[in-house]
Amino acid sequence: MTDTIDDVTFDQMRQLVGLVDYDATKDPFPVKAMDAVVFTVGNATQTAWFYQAAFGMTLVAYSGPETGQRDHKSFVLKAGSARFVVNGGVAPDSPLHDHHRKHGDGVVDLALEVADVDQCIAHARAQGATVLEEPHDVSDEFGTVRMAAIATYGETRHTLVDRSRYSGPYLPGYVSKAGRARKRLFQAVDHCVGNVELGRMDYWVEFYNRVMGFVNMAEFIGDDIATDYSALMSKVVSNGNHRVKFPLNEPAIAKKKSQIDEYLEYYGGAGCQHIALATNDIIGTVVAMREAGVEFLETPDSYYDDPELRARIGEVRVPIEELKRHRILVDRDEDGYLLQIFTAPVGDRPTVFYELIERHGSLGFGKGNFKALFEAIEREQERRGNL
Ligand SMILES: [Fe+2]
């Protein structure tokens, strides 16, 4: 296959996010890709600037009062195949202000690109999903988009988008808007993690299996790891070819207050916890983002000096001293290895944060790093007085 996804080739995408082969004809809810991660924030104008200046994203489209959208401003940003949409209320009575009052800055929609919106909605409805928007066409001079939406955890939704008959910059109602050219720092969204309430992880795993035909991936964090190191339980669902991966976390009863409990308290319920961005040069990305002021979680020296870690990870593409200098984590499984690092929360509330991930064959999520990650997050939590 040679098709490209916004100048990321299929083979590059296979390496970036760890694609596997599967038979789409047997899929009751075939998903092509993440369409967009949609945020509601307190100040979209400045948040859009942040993603350009600090995350190297390119502004591509806009909708707001100047284009006839009087309720809110909406900025569309891209990096390779990754698309973020940042919305903030303008009209004093905009419902976006109510959402923001309750949740703070957060992800409201994990929009998915599908080939057949009606087929997906029919299947989801038959499986008991809440259909928030019935399938409908939206058109302008660039063509027609077919859309619908279903509810998932908390107040989060999955908008389904068929944009195969559309050539505009994002959706009807948006105009092209060019920002300053930036050096691209990542190429794709690798996975989006949902935090759900205690005891609800299996419910949502089953929801994705049943409603969206997602499959369970091998990686999970159970009781054994949870109690001592992670304070969370985690399972991962994905669409058939692993292009779209949704890890689902719930709090675990641990020795200290769980980071998931902290999220649930400050977000006001279940929601999207972190978005992992795939890069083919994690060191370059981390250097550029740090330079722009993005804060990353610290990892203790002891993590890198541990002979057990060195034995476990073996040879990776850069010397471990370089990983140590940049505080990048490394994990290996039977398929290969991955490099990863986590930012501090990017908003005011201790909720949404980012991960950078560089995959070399591994289809995992860094389970082996839970102990190190847990210790790092715990130190941050302690500084906020929430431990
Ligand atoms: Fe992750």
Image (cartoon, grey):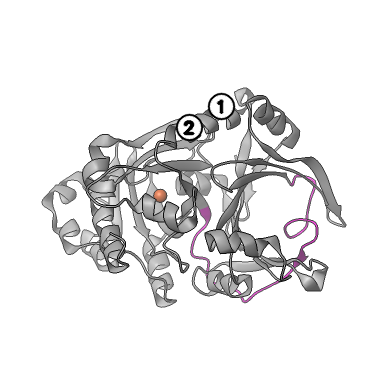
Above or below residue 147? Residue 61 is below
Residue occupying image coordinates x 33% and y 46%: 366
For this rendering, which residue is in front, 11 or 362? Answer: 362
| Label 2 CA crowd tier, 10 Å (few <14, some 14–19, many 20+) | few
Report the amino acid beneath label 1. Answer: Arg
- Residue 243 visible to an observer of this rendering: yes
Residue occupying image coordinates x 74% and y 60%: 169
| Bounds of the magenta segment | 163-188
Judged left or right of residue 294, residue 131 is right
Residue 217 image point, x, y percent = 42, 33
From the image, state whether disc 2 or disc 1 is nearer to you.
Answer: 2
Which residue corresponds to mark 1?
210
Above or below residue 119? Residue 380 is below
Q: Quadrant of residue 60?
A: bottom right
Position of the N terminus, as image quadrant, is top right
Under circle 2, the secondary element is helix
Which residue corresponds to mark 2?
203
Q: Residue furthest top?
A: 26
For this rendering, which residue is in front, 260 or 30? Answer: 260
